[in-house]
Amino acid sequence: ERAIEIFRKVVELTPEGHPDKPGRFCILGVALRGRFKRFGELGDLERAIAAFQRGVELTAKGHPAQSRILANLGIVFNERFNRLGELDDLEWAIAAKHRAVELTSEDHAELPQRLNSLGVALNDRFGRLGDMDDLERAIQTYVRAVTLTSDGHPEQSWRLASLGVALRDRFRHRGELDDLESAITIFQRTIDLTPEAHPDISWKTYQLGLSL
């Protein structure tokens, strides 16, 4: 609570046109999203969206913070879609995430995460509308994210799992056995990468079981 009030005050005291103002809106948005994730208050998510949107509006073309703010904006739109089910939120999420990826260099440490996040949104839209083009794009995006993720990265198994789920979905729609076999191999890999006592191991084992 105190941190959010401080960040809000910092934003208020930062003059219009100051080069740090977009980044300060982003910091405020991150804090509001954190409180939303902890307490589930939709108002915090709405305020986070507004903060990120303002940050985007104030960011000059080519500003180094532009891709980061867009990536965060896409995430909170996706979270509001998950809460309310409004398709417009998902469309805005995809647009923001796609632009964030476009603005992120190939060697940027955040590119794999941003690609995976875009894949999630595309897969969500496939789940809502059933357009196979969305599933194909999601798979391509997941493959790129996995390829760019180094061995031993803490998110490696989850990025693999996202790809596995999408490949299994494509198998169910198109019946290509290669997709199912790839999904099984990937889910086995996610289990191998997860310690036995980890709370996620049951979900990953379940996903493997669904694929067998």
Image (cartoon, helix red, strand yellow):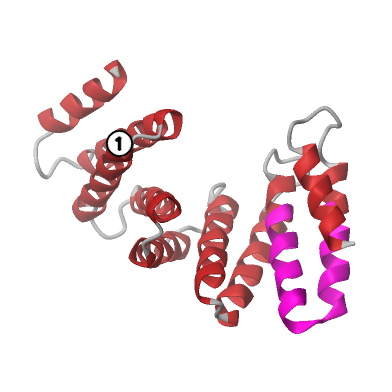
Q: Is residue 182 left or right of residue 124?
A: right
Q: Which residues are magenta?
A: 161-187
- Between 183 and 169, the residue placed more toward the observer is 169
The residue depicted at 30 percent of the width and 20 percent of the height is 3
The residue depicted at 23 percent of the width and 38 percent of the height is 20
The residue depicted at 50 percent of the width and 58 percent of the height is 105
- Between 69 and 80, the residue placed more toward the observer is 80
Q: Picture coordinates of residue 199 (x, y %)?
A: 74, 31
What amino acid does circle 1 point to? Answer: Asp
Q: Is residue 53 left or right of residue 110?
A: left
Q: Picture coordinates of residue 132 (x, y %)?
A: 60, 81
Q: Is residue 172 found inside the magenta-colored segment of the image?
A: yes
- Between 164 and 9, the residue placed more toward the observer is 164
| Vertical order, 57 against 20 (above or below) | below
Q: Picture coordinates of residue 150 (x, y %)?
A: 73, 47
Secondary structure at numbered mark 1:
helix
Predominant SS of the magenta segment: helix
- The image quarter containing residue 39 is top left
- The image quarter containing residue 185 is bottom right
**Which residue does the numbered mark 1 point to in the structure image?**
44
Q: Quadrant of the N terminus?
A: top left
| Vertical order, 46 against 165 (above or below) | above
Q: Is residue 192 left or right of residue 45?
A: right
Number of labels in the image equals 1
Q: Is residue 113 found inside the magenta-colored segment of the image?
A: no
| Vertical order, 28 against 119 (above or below) | above
Q: Is residue 106 left or right of residue 23?
A: right
Q: Picture coordinates of residue 207 (x, y %)?
A: 79, 53
The residue depicted at 69 percent of the width and 66 percent of the height is 166
